Amino acid sequence: MSVFNSERIEVVSSQSSDEQQQGGALKDLKVVELGSMLAGPFVGTMLADFGARVVKVEKPGKPDALREWPPHKDGFALWWKTMARNKHLVTLDISQPKARELALRLVGESDIVIENFRPGTLERWGLSPEELRERFPQIVWVRVSGWGQNGPNSGQGGYATIAEAFSGLASFTGHPAVGPMVSAFPMGDYLAGIFGAFGALAAIHRREKTGEGQIVDVALYEPLLRIIEAVVVRYDQTGVNKPLLGNQMEEDVPRNIYAASDGGAIAISCGSQRIFEALADAMERPDLKADQRFRTMTDRVANRGAIDAEVAGWVGAQKTDDALTQLLAHGVVAGKINTIGDVLQDAHVAARRMIRTIADPDVGIMRMPAPVPALSETPGSIRWTGLNPGSSNDEVFGGWMGLSADELSALKRDRII
């Protein structure tokens, strides 16, 4: 009996019944997720959002540490509710020799295995992808770690904060008077998850032609290094580092966040001459277009402080909505700094269905971000939220794998599951 031949779990959600029945673009993929916290599990979440059947494995008595992270409501971890959505949750102590055959059965029927342990951990547990390649040549292994599977730093622990620092991104992110800064959110983990999911699907595409899987090796810092490509080639060719400019941008002036008189703020970015001239018109300052200091982008870069002060003064004298209305009417690329409350009430976000409403069995009705990107024929969906440890044990090990009630009881008694 295939481990993955169960009927889909149904919950009340914001989706129509037609959308739920349609199935996702990845509904034929079987995934085993062995990782914890953020980067590896986000690979699984991305795949699960688009229909992949993801079985997430947690250690009995020591579940994923993300369950401990705030915020909580009524004792339930809210972050977990979205990270573990659409996943079938089982407990299995894969570090125990007695669990090996059960783990291999689960792994052997999968298309993709995801893990984000420190390099060498799977090998120590007897689940080395290289050693299992002959037995399971079809599997795509996604291995996410702080530093990658090889290299002098591979044995070190890694987090998104360290990845931002090491990648060079933090060296030009921050204010001159304060120094380098990292994001107030584990951006590196989520970016690694996206790259990991992309790598998994690229490997699956190749497997369709060759029948062979492969290893997808993602280090947390590498996606960050990849997206700062212009900064890298600039230093390589000129020897010049990108400077700290706060919310400004070296190549795009004026570009900043400007405070309004009512406590709101507006982001403005003038990436072209046309947009700068539109800004001058919105400000009713035609003299700015004729000012020799501001005539070209090169001139504005050289005089960034002066033009930035002009824009700051204009926005600061108005209410947020009034200034934004004027800017948009003239074709300026601008936007209000939204709170999350603003986002949840925004008409554009609603029109794009970017927030979905889900009925969670623990905390009730909750809203969370929708799957991205939007597919016209096989859209992603949120079928259920993150559940409790081992909630799918009977379903997976009993119903799918055919273990008897006595066998399940023995596994639970020995703390294998």
Image: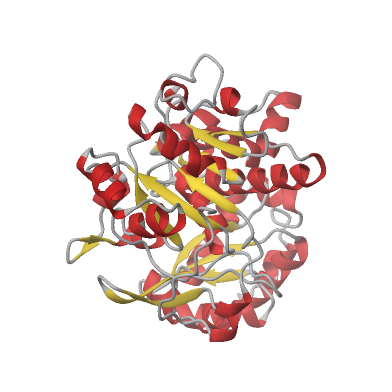
Q: Residue 140's quadrant in the figure?
A: top right
Q: Residue at x 70, y 56 (%)?
A: 294
Compared to residue 133, the image places residue 259 above or below, namely below
Q: Residue at x 49, y 20 (%)?
A: 154
Q: Is residue 173 visible?
A: no
Compared to residue 151, the image places residue 193 above or below, namely below
Q: Residue at x 58, y 79 (%)?
A: 21
Residue extending farthest top: 152
Locate residue 278 relative to residue 407 in the image: left or right.
right
Coordinates of residue 261 in the picture (x, y in percent): 39, 74
Coordinates of residue 15 in the picture (x, y in percent): 51, 81
**In front of the other: 151 or 179:** 151
Q: Residue at x 56, y 80 (%)?
A: 348
Q: Is residue 364 visible?
A: yes
Compared to residue 135, the image places residue 173 above or below, namely below
Locate residue 268 relative to residue 115 in the image: left or right.
right
Coordinates of residue 25 in the picture (x, y in percent): 66, 64
**In front of the other: 338 or 218:** 218
Label count reads 0
Locate residue 331 relative to residue 314 in the image: left or right.
right
Coordinates of residue 120 in the picture (x, y in percent): 46, 21
Compared to residue 377, the image places residue 177 above or below, namely above
Residue extending farthest left: 74
What's the colour scheme? secondary structure
What quarter of the picture does the C terminus occupy? top left
